[in-house]
Amino acid sequence: MIGRPFTARACANIALVKYWGKRDGVRNLPAAGSLSLTLDALTTVTTVRFDPALAADAMTLDGAAASAKVLARTTTWLDRVRELAGVTTRAAIDSVNHFPTASGLASSASGFAALALAATRAAGLDLDGAALSRLARLGSGSAARSIYGGLVRMHAGARVDGDDAIATPIAAAPAFVADLRMIIAEVGGGAPKTHGSRDAMDHCAATSPLYAAWVACLDGDLRAAEAAIAAGDLEALGAVTEGSALAMHAAAIASRPTVLYWQPATLAALAAVRELRGRGVGAWATMDAGPHVKVLTRAGDGAAVAAAMAAVPGVTAVTTATAGPGVEPA
Ligand code: DP6
């Protein structure tokens, strides 16, 4: 019944094989697939209520009115939900990020995943995971993956209309997934990021001489990551994870002008991860559209990795995350 509020919770995810580049900006279709781990420690809780008394959508983010840019993006996205539900009613949206550290940690992924469930239910729809993933993708590509928990595969989508560019859960051994840890080393006190990922990936695709090489390595990396998961081989998964992040950043850094997210502490954290590996600790780094370093490891090594990250000068906070659930009512 339209008019009733609905609240949903979604976790952020960190890509092990990165999404960086689109083949269609309007439908937000990725240039290739990606693969991620949904994380319990980073969640967004969103409430949506369609209200006939509203003349326009209204939104708060972490208790304050959302910026005009965020509201415009959300309204455009909600129009698709209204179209599916056959309504024109405007909505009130309240979204709160429960992140242990400040910005730069994939809040658009948990944000649009939570919004997809909350808005469709509030509009009286009851969509399956595939339809929710497709809707979330229209808001943000990485959000399509946060519909599901654990290890998740995003598909590039083969058909012309891109309708099958959705995420699906990976059937991994539960013990393998339960043993995974992601140690999040915040660099720079969570200052706002310098280049938003959407503009940065478009700029990279348009100007980086390494962009084509980056896209060309994705299918092989995805196959290698899926084989590693099937075999329960964390060393192999870790190697692909670190390789994919470095290849993405190499392409981004080569953009003209450059898209360089790293700070000195980012490199110091990367060196610390290599040093851990030299001591026989299974630890592999990944970085997104910000200076933070996230380290994939196993439960037994989590404390050693967290301590090593905390000791890096310039690392301002360290959080340990485990595999989290998919989007759910809250
Ligand atoms: C570096 O999902 O934020 O985190 O689809 O334009 O909203 P849009 O991009 P977004 O990009 C995420 C980029 C990344 C890598 C990843 O999560 O795969």
Image (spheres, rainbow, N blue to C red):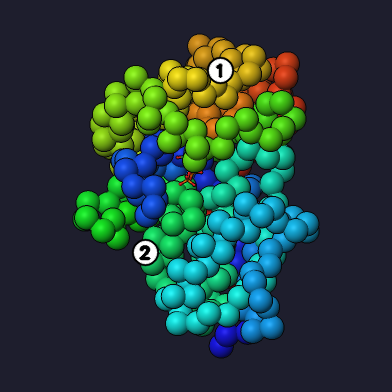
C-alpha distance separating marks 2 and 1: 36 Å
Tally of numbered tags: 2
Q: Which mark is residue 130?
A: 2
In the rendering, at what x and y percent does residue 313 appear? 73, 16
Q: Quadrant of the C terminus?
A: bottom right
> Relative to 81, is 107 on the left or the right?
right
Q: Which mark is residue 33?
A: none
Q: Quadrant of the N terminus?
A: bottom right
* Label 1 within 8 A of ligand 1 by Cβ: no
Q: Residues within 10 Å of mark 1 (few under 14, many from 20)?
A: many
Residue toward you, 307 or 40: 40
Q: Residues within 10 Å of mark 2 (few under 14, many from 20)?
A: some
Q: Residue furthest right?
A: 63
> Relative to 252, is 119 on the left or the right?
right
Q: Residue furthest front?
A: 55
First reached walking from the N terminus: tag 2 or tag 1: 2
Q: Which mark is residue 270?
A: 1
With respect to residue 183, does 2 lie above or below?
below
